[in-house]
Image (cartoon, coloured by chain):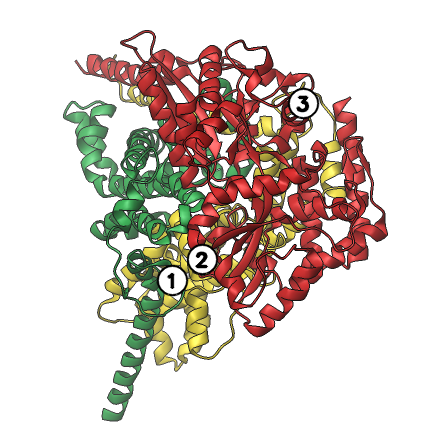
Chain colours: A green, B yellow, C red
Amino acid sequence: MSNKKKRQIIKDVLTYIFLTLLGILMIYPLIWMFFSSFKSNNEIFGPLRLLPEHVIWDSFYRGWNSGQFTYSLYFKNTFMLVIPVVLFTLISSTLVAYGFARFTFPMKGALFSIMISTLMLPNAVIIIPRYILFNRFGWLNSYKPFTVPSIFACHPFFIFMLVQFFRGLPKELDESATIDGCNSFTTLVRIHMPLIKPALFSAAIFQFIWTWNDFFNSLIYINSVKKYTISLALRMSLDTAAAANWNEILAMSTLAILPSVLIFFFAQKYFVEGIATTGIKG
Amino acid sequence: MKGHVNSKKKKRQYIGLLYILPWILGFLIFQLYPFISSFIYSFTNYNMTSNTEFIGLKNYIDIFTKDSQFYNSLKVTIFYVFMAVPMKLIFALIIAMILNIKLKYVNFYRTIYYLPSILGGSVAVAVLWRFLFADSGLVNEILSFFGIPKIGWLSNPKIALFTISLLTVWQFGSSMVIFLAGLKQIPKELYEAATVDGVSKAGMFFTITLPLLTPIILFNLIMQMIIAFQEFTGSFVITNGGPMKSTYLYAMKLYDEGFLFMKMGYASALSWVLFTVILVCTALIFKSSEYWTYYEDGGQY
Amino acid sequence: MKRIAKVLCLVCIVAMLAILAAGCGQKTPTGNTSSQNTDDVTKPVDKPESITMRFSWWGSDIRHKATLDAIAAYNKLYPHITIEGEYGGYDGYQQKLMTQLAGGSAPDLIQTDPIWNAQLGAQKENFVDLAKESEIDMTQFEEEVIKGFCEVNGIVLGLPMGINGFGVQVNKAFMERFNIPLDTRWTYEKIIEVGRKVHEQDSECYLYIEDLTGLQVKFMCDYTRSKYGKYWINDDYKVHITKDELAEQFKVMKELFDSGAAVPLGDAALYNNKVEQHPKFINGQIGMTQDWSGTLPKYKDVIGAENFAVGHSITVEGGVDSSTTYKPSMLLSVYSKSKYVDEAVKFTNWLLNDSEASLILNDCRSIPASASARQALIDNDVLDKDIMQMVENTLENPADPVPLIMNNSEIAEITKDICQKVVFGESTPEEAAEELISRVSEKLEALKAESN
């Protein structure tokens, strides 16, 4: 018996060692990125030490302030793009998900199937006509190609996710709300919204991070440096850095992922919930 | 209104339509219209400057007979998909299994493993990859510390695609979380019964865990595959398609034709070829899934 | 009561949708023109005369800073004119520009590379004919330069910003370390010979670095000219090189890398158009590269002025032509669909000819092409000696202009593609020669058909 216990303990220890090593492997690149932003070029490529021998303190300051515009502008731009997209996505997806989850209307089945199938529609196949369309609208070099589609609930993933949550709410709620004098809209706002708050939160976080990281769309729609998002600014820094001050580039990369990482740590449980709900039921 | 239960219900039905109206409009304008028009563009020489003419199947014929980069990029993309997606899913599944054992601090590990996933296709991570896998980068320095000769992670045409795939595998966290949630749903009684029957751990994995997870594996497989077929940022920022076009993914080819050479018609045809490839792969997986997917409710998917 | 609420709710939703719809509907399709400046139209402007123009260029941080400073100085002179810079690296600049031109959203002021003249000239309606603008002092520019490099399809597409010399940019310390004389007149054969020894001596070191774009723009073009006194393709849409000649050329190219003289291409290609960022270059483990004098400041910055030297361009052993490629560093063009063509033209003249502008820009685009701007630099004795040396070397024996067709983006792609196959050993030089000739001939025919 004690032998068995011993073996169990050894097994546990081995598991922990494995998990820890893997964990280090997973986040070491990020840690390395952070510390390397204080290193000189010679130290970035070369010695294995994680901590810099000669600390360069001003890489963040210099990286931030290079060029006509500083990273303050790029961060501001990114927020100006991301926040409306997140808000509009939340509002429109909630309305649509509510419509799908709570009402029976003609063609509902067909429409729902279409919505689900667009979940799998490769973006590549519609990107060119979209570009041409936005060009005709005169939306190039603005954030409209991002915000307007989100007003029209063009992110089926979130509709789907919220539908799953709405379905989990008992129908009796609606009925009693109706008796209390609520119409369908007030029912949504007063009764449902508070209940699906976690789901809304998950949706907001996902949309925030996805839009924040998006590169391809920014690349084709945004031209002027004044409107650059972080992704574009980073690529520009990578392309044109004088004397290749990599510590500055790494410093800015570190800052670029910081909002996502912070949100992740403060709101982890919503990530897991959001993914798990759609994942299982999909 | 007469307060009649039935008529009230009917009234509600149309309000439902009103709620989904934004989506209907959005779908028509931003999805269906581009979808159809890209099909139409694919039969034209549309390039935004000169006059547009219908040229029949010429784009498609050129793609299959003249465009040598087409076959290369398709090959590279298929290699990438078949390398990155299974690696990612298998890895995610193994780690999910380990984390599913009753351990302390599971949440802590889950958090750590999940972290890279949120960085997705961000440029910052691509920049980081360039540094880590450069010829004199961190990875090679570590290897040479152990006396292993330097590897051309990004400069050797035979390896570069693998290095890009590693970036995808690194972000296995979201698949892992989905698997983990699926594992939690498997009734404990099944394992208990199996233990009584004297089934080995490996046996349980193959007779209980894996079959019950198959619907989730299927879902993951399809979604990850669709995403992988369209991967862009990694190869664009890290290697720019090189060396020797060995990481020239289909999305980059599409970007070059559409936005560098402005051959929008041609690029639309390319995008439809990709769409067909994805469709066929999805259909094959679905078809084959009838043989390997297990549904508790008898297939009411 | 309930009914009213319901109606209200309906109205709310409809109103919301209407607002949303209006938000995106206010800009009805305007066709291909003037889609860009919508922002300025919608913004209520306090001073009606204040205008904002966009100016795009590529370069390194040094050039960005100088250009931005010049823009700021112009803004001081004319406070109502704001100029926004759209700048980045060379990689991807052309594709972005082509996209913008096609979409009707190009910047008002555009820096272009003369090697794109064929493609830009094909859409000359997008550019202002600067020779016809009275605001521009054309007398400051040499006529041959304008005729040879700026005039396409009957219009002056852009004005030269600088005179580009061409040659090797050398790390002196490296050369001293390996006992290589600084005044070596390099040929590709010599680079292979010396470079092989260098690499054998220290496997971490390479004599030379060239990226993929360099192989196409520099090696492929210069080698044929230097050896046979001709360009391998010409603007008559024909290939002017035999299979055997081409195969031999490919052999040398392959040897350049196989011998260890040049940094492995796969590694160098990661730093395409920015080889100065290569870690080995920064660590002084690379001897030299070959580039335009307009790019000199960035190399000098990395190597350090005390270790930096320039030399003549690379030729071919036993070749018939020892001339050096010569071109204006870049052109400045004005977008014809700009709302402020007149202001843009005025700025162009100021930036290129004015002595104040010249002193700010200095040599960030090599030596100014404008006589007055050049004079200002000479008077103030601020010209970089190395750049002057390089331009001088080049002007000793400048080559005929490179045929425009050679740098057509599709031809360039094919060339690069096949160069890679040779260097990585996927094709033998003979196979590659055959493939290049057949693919380029086919593409040339298609381009010829398009141009007619």
Q: Quadrant of the N terminus of chain A?
A: bottom left
Give the quadrant of residue C326. Answer: top right
Work out whether residue C100 or residue A190 is closer to the camera in this orientation and state it: C100
Please give the chain letter of the residue carrying mark 2: C
- Above or below, A80 against A281 in this view is above
| Residue tagged 3 | C147
- Above or below, C432 against B96 in this view is above
Which disc is residue C282 wearing? 2
**Do dots 1 and 3 share one subunit?**
no
Work out whether residue C387 or residue C78 is closer to the camera in this orientation and state it: C387
Residue located farthest toward the top when viewing the structure as drawn = C48
Residue at 58% across, 64% down: C180
Residue C7, image x and y in percent?
25, 13
| Residue tagged 1 | A42
- Above or below, B1 against B151 in this view is above
Between circles 1 and 3, the one closer to the viewer is: 3
Work out whether residue A281 or residue C341 is closer to the camera in this orientation and state it: C341
Residue C112 seen in this snapshot: yes
Please give the chain letter of the residue carrying mark 3: C
Between circles 2 and 3, the one closer to the viewer is: 3
Give the crowd class for mark 3: few <14, some 14-19, many >=20 residues within 10 Å: few
Tell me the amino acid under the disc marked 1: Asn
Whether residues under marks 1 and 2 lie with C-beta atoms below 8 angstroms apart, the answer is yes
**Of the image marks 2 and 3, the number of the one nearer the N terminus:** 3
- Is residue A264 rendered to the left or right of residue C104? left
Tag 1 secondary structure? helix
